[in-house]
Amino acid sequence: MSHGAWRVADVRAAEDALMAKLPEGTLMQRAATGLATRCAHLLDGNLYGARILLLVGAGNNGGDALYAGARLAKRGARVQALLLDKDRAHQKGLTALRSAGGSTVDRVPSTVDIVLDGIVGIGGRGGLRPEAAARVAEAARSSRAVVAVDIPSGVDADTGAVEGEAVTADVTVTFGCLKPGLLVGAGAAHAGLVDLVDIGLRPRVPPALRLATRSDIQEWWPVPKRESDKYTRGVVGLATGSKTYPGAAVLSVAGACAGPTGMVRYAGAAAEYVKLRHPSVIVSERAADAGRVQAWVCGSGLGTDEHGAAELRTVLAAPVPVCLDADALTLLVDGSMAHALRDRKAPVVVTPHDREYARLAGAPPGPDRVGSALRLAAQLNATVLLKGDRTVVAGPDGEAWVNPTGTAALATGGSGDVLSGLLGSLLAGGLPPIRAAVAAAYAHGLAGRRAAEGGPVTASDVADALRPTVGDLTGR
């Protein structure tokens, strides 16, 4: 259940189906119990005298907060509720709070241990209203920690979009299943640490967004068999780099060498640099002369002149999966390669950052990053790896994944070259394009974190960290 995220409509349908089988109010009580338990953990169990403020809006989200507040009050916490809409506050929850010794207030106290954001639930749209935004700002200044109830108020649960003022939580306690808005875009930054409470919810449809996990990557990663040789493990070719950008070749080859394939072939003007750094790599000057491969990587530092275009045409004509990055994406923009893309039967993976996405799609991704990646995947009939703090991988069939291992340390020139090389190696090792892209992003993110432990990060640091990272990840 924790490996997927469901849209609001699917969550509501699952809630309705479950509530039809349970006594009235059971789901809210389960949610409130889980929420109160997480708050107690934040306080290391020291609830007696703890100061807790509930920011309560209308409806069930406020009810969850009020019932959780009642449980905390019964354990000795000093719980106060600030009602942002007194006429529409959850009356049974309010009665429970007062019966447990809690109270209501008209202003934010000067000092608070925990603020519970129960203003707007998963059905909310748009940013916070000015009064609510002002109270949230006051509370954040006064408190040690902000805990969002189900989703930070002001965050779109389906997309992660934040269209105005929104709560920035330290912890979000979400109920039943994850929501896409907690995992991607601005919503992920506002959610903080996401804690899932199981209330028995079981959506009947596939998730709108899947969350990559360590166990997924370990299960998928190609493993050599006893009878394997360098060819059966896969051969990856790289048409990357140029006389102007030889480093792109070296970095992309480093990424490929950390992958599962048994042989790496490099084709390009940076052959001498590649041989010096990676003597096991077979080099040639042109993709047409490289020999047989099971997948191609093309674009990093390639250049966009006629030579670069010719190399891209050669790669696209090959009946094997290809990963297109950087300059290869620029060469796609004018439409001259459209026929080559349409004629391909083998998979294509593209790896744009936001500016490259804008050139390919005609507009930036926008706040709905999953929807944006899916639209480009359908447009190109390709798997799209949309880079970012929470990299999104989308397939033309509508499948979408988010990578949780991203780090700002990867925002450095050349780190994408390392990623594309690793991705190509995974393709050559036999992984389907979606899994290859997800696994590459996951391992690349961990390598970025590892490299950052030593201080400021360069792409070479990421490349150096990738091999031990893959070893730790796969246990080999």
Image: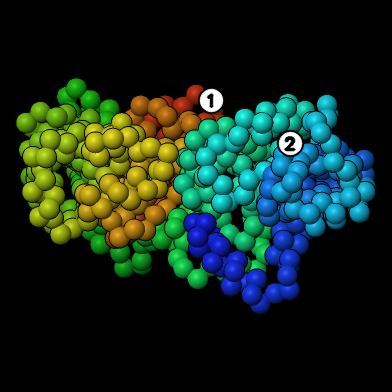
Q: Is residue 313 left or right of residue 273?
A: left
Give whichever of 57, 318 is nearer the camera.
57
Give whichever of 91, 271 is nearer the camera.
91
The circle on residue 163 is none
Q: Is residue 411 left or right of residue 306?
A: right
Quadrant of the rendered structure where residue 114 is? top right
Total numbered badges shown on the rendered structure? 2
Evaluate whether residue 21 shows in this view: yes
Evaluate whether residue 405 shows in this view: no
Give whichever of 20, 167 is nearer the camera.
20
Query: Looking at the image, which residue is at 12% across and 35% down?
Result: 334
Residue 18, compared with residue 342, is above or below; it is below
Give whichever of 149, 470 is nearer the camera.
149
The local secondary structure at tag 1 comes to loop
Q: Which residue is mark 2?
A: 145
| Residue mark closest to the camera, 1 vs 2 | 2
Residue 99, compared with residue 333, is above or below; it is below
Q: Position of residue 80 (x, y in %)?
A: 84, 41
Query: Looking at the image, which residue is at 80% across and 57% down?
Result: 92
- How many angstroms separate mark 1 from mark 2 (CA)? 29 Å
Query: Looking at the image, which residue is at 53% across and 49% down?
Result: 157
Q: Are marks 1 and 2 in contact (CB under 8 Å)?
A: no
Q: Which residue is mark 1?
A: 455
